[in-house]
Amino acid sequence: MTPTIVVLGGGYTGVMSAVRLARHTRRARAQVILVNPSDRFTERLRMHQIATGQALSDYRIPELLSGVGAEFVQGRATNIDPERQEVRVTGAEGERLLSYDYLVYAVGSVTDTTTVPGVDAHAYTLNSPAEAARLGARLAELSKRGGGTVAVAGAGLTGVEAAAEIAESYQGVRVVLLGRDEPGAMMGAKARRYLRDALDRLGVEVLAGVEVTKVLPDAVELAGGELVPVDACLWTTGFVAAPLAREAGLVVDGKGRVVVDATLASVSHPSVYAIGDAAAIRQAWGEIHGTCQSGIPTGAHAADSIARRLRGKKPKPFRFGYIHQPVSLGRRDAVIQFTHPDDSPARWYLTGWAAVAYKEAVTSSPPKTYRLSRWVTVPARALARTGGRANRPVAAR
């Protein structure tokens, strides 16, 4: 019988998995179906560019799948029944029930807007292109009226990139970066110093060692009660996984991520493979954190594992190590921290125009990788060089 493989989520990891699955299961005549709410492929690594009004390439998922034999279904997955091996999908034409032999769970996660009071009501996020565009409209409004204050909560790499992009694009807007740690805390001392100097040069005010305890309509409240008046707050800290897996009865961790074995199969339901930051994946050196850099290789490995099972072979364990932390600092500057496999900083780093070129090559690489993967098997080591840190929007729910 013809096996059916359903991929939930059309982000970086889901598209990689669908393309690779279609290529590796041709002899088995498998039917590969990718499900996503939108037919547009969103470059999550560029969400801060959308927020500053920049026009991006218009990639469409059906075009990325063209020629590989995978089917695209536009709709939102609302329920998974892992016992019956069925997924309920709601789209413009109503509900549809998809049966599967294997399911690839690539629905991602979102910035947590529920833990800190007021975030859901008063803060902006980069959870989707629509949310980023909403922030963009607010920034344009502030710029038009002569300025204002924008707080970026979270000094991780997403927050740093957003703060730098806003400061460079809207020079009349005051940007305050708030974080528990110093910006670039995961980098080596020299790269971190360069990053901080770049933020200073762009006029970004950094308040490190602070915790936001509440977001108000016109201010953020810090631990201790201090108020920072703002005209807009961008929230980039914390994330939560989509509830779909937990509701389906799959074993998940405390963050809602599917717990997987060494081959990326669910420990409770082996016909389900979880990838990207929808999965709790451990390596010998520790737990993988959600990035495009690690997500795309997981998508490829899940595809390879399913293909091996269809051929009656035993899947291989997933092996991964980080190689870099690419960070844009506006359109004219960047810093690249090269890393050890566990993502700790190595000795080497890159800055300036060379880092800008490197970062752009990394950010633009996923669509090119998908096209190449139609014809050749891209080695997992090479896939680790695609992408960088990633925002975490839900791709399908």
Image (cartoon, helix red, strand yellow):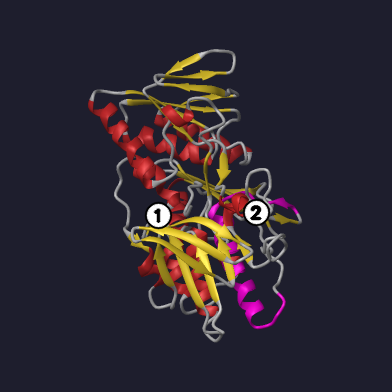
> Is residue 391 in view?
yes
216 or 194, nearer to the observer:
216
Image mark for residue 42? 1
Left or right: residue 44 compared with residue 144: right
Q: What residue do we see at 30% from left, 46% from top? A: 54
Position of residue 65 measured from the top left corner of the image (x, y, whole percent): 41, 71
User: Which residue is painted at 58% across and 24% down in the image?
Assistant: 211
Main secondary structure type of the part rendered in magenta: helix
Tell me, yes or no, whether the highlighted magenta stretch contains residue 286.
yes
Residue 249, label in figure: 2
Q: Which residues are magenta?
A: 285-314
Determine whether the residue tagged by mark 1 lies in a helix, strand or loop. loop
Q: Residues within 10 Å of mark 1 (few under 14, many from 20)?
A: many
Query: Looking at the picture, does residue 90 appear above or below residue 17?
Result: above
The answer to whether any part of residue 332 appears in the image is: no
Against 277, is 7 above or below?
below
Of residues 316 and 372, which is closer to you in this image?
316
